[in-house]
Every structure is written in C-alpha cells, then in structure tokens.
Amino acid sequence: MKSTEEECCEFEMMQKDVHATFLELMYYLLPSPYETQEINHLTLAYFVISGLDILNSLHSVAKDAVVSWVLSFQAQPGAKADLNDGQFYGFHGSKTSQFPPDENGVLIHNNSHLASTYCAIAILKIVGCELSNLDSESIVSSMRNLQQTDGSFIPIHTGGETDLRFVYCAAAICFMLNNWSGIDKEKAKAYILRCQSYDGGFGLVPGAESHGGATYCAIASLRLMGLIEDNILSTSVSSSLIDVPLLLEWILQRQGTDGGFQGRPNKSSDTCYAFWIGAVLRILGGSNFIDQKALRGFLLSCQYKYGGFSKFPREDPDLYHSFYGFTAFSLLEESGLKSLCSQLGITQNAAMGL
C-alpha cells in the first residue's frame, strides 16, 4: 500500500481532469469529515462550483438545480418595513441555521451571514443566474445594519467579530449586485487604511499583525470600491492611498525557500497563500516579481494523486486548500484553466457575466 507521500508526489504536472473528478464527487456527496462544517454548507458549495468553473468543468453541474438550492437559503423580510428592523436579510450558511418564520411570516431566528451571502451570490453568478431577478435591494439595504461606526462590519446582525474579512464580503456583494447603497465607502476606506501595519502588510483589525489573508481582503476591497487602480505598480504610486512600496516589500518576503508562500513571518508555506498573496500581487501588477517556477513546484508537492491539494506537502487534501490550489494555478496561467478575477475569487467569465 502506497504512503501519502508517494501518492502526493507522483506527478510533475497539474492534473486538471483528476481534480475535476475530485470536485464532481464533492458536488454529489461530501465525505463524512465535513459533517462538522455543515453550518458552512454554502461556502463548501462555493469551493466546489467555483473550482469546477476554474477547471473548465462546469458542464457537470445541474445549473438550474444549483440556483434553486442557493435561493432557498435567502432570508426574506416579511414586509419592506422590516428592512429597518436592524436585521440582515442575506443568505443562511446552511439549513441547520435556517428556521421557518412564525405564523405571521416574521423571521424569529434570522441567521443570515455576510460570508454566506458572498458565497451565494458568487455561485449564482458562476452558474449564469440573472441577478436582476434576485431580491438584491433587501440584501444591500439591510446590510447597512451591519456596518459599524468605525467602518468595519459584523457578519451577522446578532453580533460577532468585526474585521477586514467582512469589509471584503460587503464590498464584493455590492460589486456583484452593482449596488453600493449597502456600504459607506468612506468609512470602510478609513477602517481599511487603519489596518495597514508598520511593515506594510495589513492586519485583520487596526494594530494587529500583518497577515496574508487580511492583506488580500484590504487590497481587494479597495480595488472593488474603485479606490485604487488595477496594476498600480505600473503607474505613479506616490498618490496612492496605501504605502505600496512597503506593502510590496512585505509581500515579496512571504515566498519561502521551498517556493511556497507563508501567511506571516516565521510560518510554514501553505497552499492557500499562493492565492491570498498571489492575488494581491496580480491586483498590484507585481506577479512577475516572484519565482513562479518555484511556486509551481511547491504547489505540485501538495497535489494529491486522486485529486485535490493539501495544506502542506505530503498530506491529505481538503476542499479549502484544493480550491485555493486551483486559483493559484489559474493565477500562474496554467494551460486549460480559466482566467481568474483576482478581487472576486471567481473566473473572469463569471465576473463579466459571460
């Protein structure tokens, strides 16, 4: 019987068809270890659907069934006046967080979540659903209830953490729905800028340690809101909102001797940061500053024989790291993969509605 190490390192190329089969299996039935993540069912579905699109394998998906399934998670206000009741009317993350309304149609337990809403709308765009048919006004209007006085967002109206992850979700939702009434851009911008650390990266909250994921959320949000230019390194950076040279220095220091990217100093390289860091470089216009061959080699060391990618080399794959492995190879312009919209985490075709 072969070891995991042998099964991970057998190929020297990205096995697109094997990965597509891996995702198709996940599409029909998630393995039992994912039972503990049922609360994030929509997010898992996003990894599968978006991953299949990147791999040019969306033909295996029953798109109408996907649309119906996703729309079943949306929280609907009983009346238009309910949009001012302090709740958020987005999408629930799973059926376990979705409770039926009372006899008057009022949602007693509305657990719709910003991250789930981002995933839901992204899936709908990927499968070609016409978003004009979506009750987008309820989503963006009630999303204002989640923005805090400092410009940050809580993910759910009953409370929670406030950090850059949810600023990004709010910006991505508004961008995809082409409706910015749900976010105060100036407040959000001020919050993001306060999160840039002394070393150039961004922390999840002001004063926090710089982190690859938080840096992506900051830069992608600013780009989605039109507050920084695309390919900013090719233009004058002196007028930029952010300290671009310091940010670039921090970003480039994240590539390790093994070719992979780490999320923070003194951490091991991890497959997912090939996207979180790589996408920032793509937005800034600095993709050519890294050793792409070495990065590709690291990713291949995390590729599993039967499909998927692991977090670290020679480990078993999981859906999260598999998806970000696919996005990383798309950023590396792997043959046969669709081009990625870096700031949205979906393909360019899906982002443009093609």
Image (cartoon, rainbow, N blue to C red):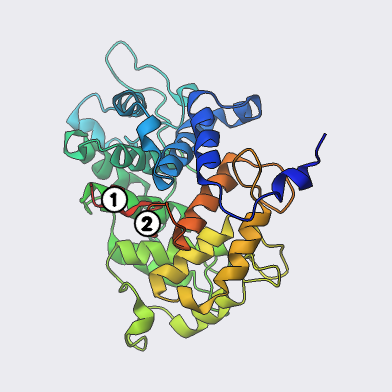
Please state the horizontal and vertical placement of residue 180, each as a whole percent of the image: 23, 54
Q: Earlier in the sequence, mark 2 or mark 1?
A: 2
Q: Residue at x 47, y 85 (%)?
A: 245
Q: Viewed as shown, does residue 15 lie left or right of 141?
A: right
Q: Which residue is mark 2?
A: 339
Q: Residue at x 17, y 33 (%)?
A: 133
Residue 204 showing in the rendered view:
no
Q: Viewed as shown, does residue 120 lie left or right of 278?
A: left
Q: Is residue 83 above or below residue 78?
A: below
Please state the horizontal and vertical placement of residue 141, each as a whole percent of the image: 24, 43
Q: Viewed as shown, does residue 234 lie left or right of 303?
A: left
Q: Quadrant of the N terminus?
A: top right
Residue 165 showing in the rendered view:
yes
Q: Which residue is mark 1?
A: 349
Q: Amino acid at mark 2?
A: Ser
Q: Are marks 2 and 1 in contact (CB under 8 Å)?
A: yes
